[in-house]
Amino acid sequence: MLRDTPKGAFKKYTEAYGGIMSFKSFGEWTVLVSDPALMRTGLADPAASGRLDHPLFRKRDSIIKGRDCPALGIISTSGDVWRQQRRFTLRTLREPWLRPQHAGAHHAGGAGRVTPSV
């Protein structure tokens, strides 16, 4: 699996282990949820509003982008950015017209490539 992209590897893991699994990443336990129904349930829970602020994510992003920058995305964010991403993801999972198969009818460009799971 080392030759796979992260998305390809997670897709294989999802096929092998199902819609929720855990693994160690940078010495911390990580939970991967790929089932949209489980995502909705988990993200709607107020306990999901807090996130670990891991400095390795910021360092990784600054190396990749060549400059200091805020973490973006749903995986490696925390604090206010995480809360904003969480709200966006919940809304996307709840509103059918925001899902990829419907996005082209309402949005142009990259919005059609947004997916709720790997």
Image (cartoon, rainbow, N blue to C red):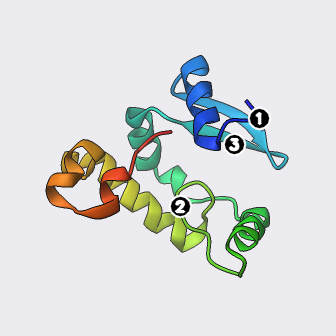
Kindly check if marks 3 and 2 are in contact, taking CB atoms under 8 A apart as contact: no
Gap in Å between the C-alphas at discs 1 and 3? 19 Å
Query: Which of the two discs, 1 and 3, labels the residue nearer the N terminus?
Result: 1
Image point (35%, 60%), residue name: 110
**Circle nearer the viewer, 3 or 2:** 2
Which of the 4 image quarters holds residue 39?
top left
23 left or right, relative to 102: right
**Circle nearer the viewer, 1 or 2:** 1
**Circle nearer the viewer, 1 or 3:** 1
- Mark sitting on residue 30: 3
Q: Residues within 10 Å of mark 1 (few under 14, many from 20)?
A: few
- Mark sitting on residue 111: none
Tag 1 secondary structure: loop
Residue 95 sits above or below residue 7 on the image = below
Q: Where's the N terminus, which quadrant? A: top right
Image point (44%, 32%), residue name: 35
21 left or right, relative to 98: right
Tag 3 secondary structure: strand
Give the amino acid at mark 1.
Leu
Residue 111 sits above or below residue 84 on the image = above
> What residue would you read off at disc 2?
73
Kindly check if marks 1 and 3 are in contact, taking CB atoms under 8 A apart as contact: no
Residue 24 sits above or below residue 77 on the image = above
Residue 60 sits above or below residue 116 on the image = below
- Mark sitting on residue 2: 1
Give the amino acid at mark 3.
Thr
Image point (77%, 69%), residue name: 59
Q: Residues within 10 Å of mark 3 (few under 14, many from 20)?
A: few
Q: In the image shown, does 60 or 64 lie closer to the viewer? A: 64
Query: Which of the two discs, 3 and 2, labels the residue nearer the N terminus?
Result: 3
Which of the 4 image quarters holds residue 66?
bottom right
Give the amino acid at mark 2.
Gly
